[in-house]
């Protein structure tokens, strides 16, 4: 076998072995980077080893054979580099910074996309990115700027206000463009005539004319009109009639009767006006639609702001780009947001807490916020908190609590409801939570708002807390059970309350529970929740008769939906009164 063929086979074998090792190393490094999100991908030098091997082989060949064989080796090196998809060194990366094939964040990215929308506007997309390595400053990427070429009306200055406020012209103004939704500051509708623009008067009108921006999608599309709709143009002079004809030809989407009024006031079709919207004016969602790769679309839609912290619940397909998402949202929502975090895993454990990961900004979860005039401070990583419950707390305080009432809260958390009830309604509050950190924050928040003498809190099991409430005289006016996962499991503890003598206070128990509607039995989620409460109080009863039985015992059951938590799954608030008849029924069964 000729020496050249032997060497060729050796090089090809080395190529295959090195590529297999290289691919496995890439896979491990990629997994490691995605798990840590702190280290960039390391450069690989498989192709360098291949070059060295080829050079050694060439050294053993005659010069003529070597010259003939070099192009083959060059093709193999290029092939390996193309398969690896990485740039071997930082110097090579600098040489590629002007290439559209290199993504914003330093990885080879052939998915760079430059798309255009309608004939009158341009929508440019930035290179999609992955969350590998350190993030450079995406803020300077010119492809994030959106450029629109809008039709205009050239309006005499004295008629600008009447044209903009005209109800027949209003639907055709650029302010109705979906592309401009969320832009801040808003795009100005009235502009000066640019110098050198092709204005109908041939100049800027000496400041006597302004341009009013129009929505291209509305004014360009033709409308079908009857002759009666077009109307009589006899009232127009010849000059005005020429203006009317030019308007109809240029802006066929606007009804003729409106164009006739414009022509009567010497309003003409103006020059095209270019509007540039830099990334500083765009929303975080709009920016992320351009930066995220297709597999990470659409961008995260929902979030919760807790003090200075923005809390996301990233879905699995968002996680590889988590740091980019955090960086964009931090930039767009500062200064009120100084840290962006995401939940890692599910709410778990007896304290209903979860692990957090900081995506951008300050590495701090110490929160201070104000809810309806009450200042609350706590560490978000140590306690459960939901801003979405703020409205429900307000509703309870305004509609259920009365001044001077005694409130018992079995799952008080950091004391938001307790402190607000004490401050707003001068209520006395006895509270409890299994989480010692929550109890600590509840007491400190009460002291910080000057109601430490109104709020008392203990740390322990809710069943023991509810049982001890029976020793109070009188009983509390309200008992809050805001633990949707298992609130109804604690209702059986009420059987320990005294029932021999008539009750001085019939406690209103407020239960929050998850529920789903039952289509087969034609019951909505509220009906299901009421029966869950009834079964928690009286386990032997038929689940479909719970509300009727409780009302026969004087419990005055009410229910309403609080919020959605998942498709078909909602949180329901159920309230009932603890009557002597109910306690006797519970104790005798």
Image (cartoon, grey):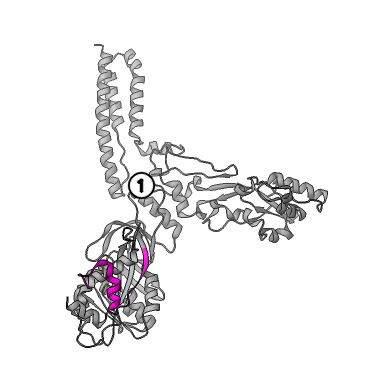
- Horizontal side of residue 263 vs 536, given as left or right: right
Give the residue displayed 33% in from the left and 84% down from the top: 405
Magenta-highlighted residues: 538-563
Q: Nearer the viewer, residue 387 or 205?
A: 387
Query: Would residue 75 be seen by someone viewing this image from the given angle?
Result: yes
Q: Nearer the viewer, residue 209 or 582?
A: 582
Give the residue displayed 28% in from the left and 38% down from the top: 26
Give the residue displayed 35% in from the left and 53% down from the top: 314
x, y (%) of residue 347?
A: 27, 60
Quarter of the image for residue 21 reads top left
Q: How many marks?
A: 1
Q: Residue furthest left?
A: 588
Q: Nearer the viewer, residue 363 or 246?
A: 246
x, y (%) of residue 494?
A: 21, 77
Quarter of the image for residue 294 reads top left
Q: Residue furthest top?
A: 1
Query: Would residue 449 be seen by someone viewing this image from the given angle?
Result: no
Quarter of the figure that contains the N terminus: top left
Secondary element at image label 1: loop
- Horizontal side of residue 221 vs 547, given as left or right: right
Quarter of the figure that contains the C terminus: bottom left
Q: Which residue is mark 1?
A: 131
Quarter of the image for residue 477 reads bottom left
x, y (%) of residue 153?
A: 69, 51
Q: Any magenta on residue 562?
A: yes
Up-down: is 45 above or below 127? above
């Amino acid at each position: 076998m000729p020496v050249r063929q032997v060497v060729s086979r050796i090089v090809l074998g080395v190529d295959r072995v090195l590529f297999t090792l290289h691919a496995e190393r890439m896979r491990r490094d990629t997994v490691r980077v995605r798990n840590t999100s702190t280290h960039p991908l390391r450069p690989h030098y498989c192709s360098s080893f291949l070059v060295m091997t080829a050079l050694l082989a060439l050294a053993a060949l005659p010069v003529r054979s070597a010259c003939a064989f070099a192009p083959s080796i060059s093709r193999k090196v290029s092939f390996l580099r193309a398969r690896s998809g990485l740039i071997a060194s930082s110097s090579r990366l600098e040489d590629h910074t002007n290439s559209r094939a290199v993504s914003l964040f330093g990885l080879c990215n052939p998915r760079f996309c430059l798309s255009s929308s309608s004939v009158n506007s341009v929508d440019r997309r930035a290179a999609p990115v992955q969350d590998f390595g350190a993030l450079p400053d995406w803020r300077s990427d010119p492809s994030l700027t959106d450029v629109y070429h809008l039709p205009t009306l050239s309006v005499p200055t004295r008629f600008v206000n009447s044209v903009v406020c005209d109800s027949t012209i209003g639907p055709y103004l650029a302010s109705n463009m979906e592309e401009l939704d969320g832009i801040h500051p808003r795009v100005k509708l009235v502009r000066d005539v640019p110098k050198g623009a092709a204005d109908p008067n041939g100049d800027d009108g000496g400041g006597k004319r302004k341009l009013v921006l129009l929505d291209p999608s509305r004014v360009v599309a033709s409308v079908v009109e009857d002759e009666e709709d077009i109307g009589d143009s006899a009232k127009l002079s010849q000059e005005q009639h020429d203006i009317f004809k030019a308007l109809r030809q240029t802006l066929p989407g606007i009804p003729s009767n409106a164009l006739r009024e414009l022509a009567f006031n010497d309003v003409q079709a103006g020059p095209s006006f270019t509007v540039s919207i830099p990334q500083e004016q765009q929303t975080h969602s709009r920016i992320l639609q351009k930066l995220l790769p297709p597999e990470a679309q659409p961008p995260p839609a929902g979030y919760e702001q807790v003090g200075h912290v923005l809390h996301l619940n990233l879905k699995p397909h968002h996680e590889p780009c988590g740091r980019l998402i955090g960086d964009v949202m931090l930039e767009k929502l500062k200064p009120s947001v100084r840290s962006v975090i995401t939940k890692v895993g599910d709410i778990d454990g007896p304290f209903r807490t979860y692990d957090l990961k900081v995506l951008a900004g300050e590495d701090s979860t110490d929160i201070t916020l104000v809810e309806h005039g009450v200042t609350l401070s706590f560490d978000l990583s140590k306690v459960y908190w939901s801003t979405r419950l703020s409205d429900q707390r307000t509703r309870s305080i305004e509609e259920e609590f009365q001044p001077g009432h005694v409130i018992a809260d079995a799952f008080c958390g950091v004391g938001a409801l307790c402190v607000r009830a004490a401050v707003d309604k001068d209520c006395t509050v006895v509270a409890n939570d299994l989480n010692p950190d929550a109890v600590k924050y509840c007491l400190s928040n009460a002291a910080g708002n000057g109601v430490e003498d109104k709020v008392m809190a203990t740390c322990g099991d809710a069943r023991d807390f509810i049982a001890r409430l029976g020793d109070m005289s009188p009983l509390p006016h309200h008992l809050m059970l805001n633990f949707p996962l298992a609130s109804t499991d604690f209702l059986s503890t009420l059987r320990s309350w005294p029932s021999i003598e008539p009750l001085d206070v019939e406690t209103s128990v407020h239960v929050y529970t998850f529920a789903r509607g039952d289509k087969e039995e034609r019951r909505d989620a509220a009906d299901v929740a009421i029966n869950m409460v009834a079964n928690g109080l009286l386990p032997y009863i038929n689940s479909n008769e719970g509300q009727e039985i409780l009302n026969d015992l004087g419990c005055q059951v009410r229910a309403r939906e609080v919020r959605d938590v998942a498709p078909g799954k909602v949180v329901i608030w159920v309230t009932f009164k603890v009557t002597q008849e109910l306690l006797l029924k519970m104790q005798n069964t």
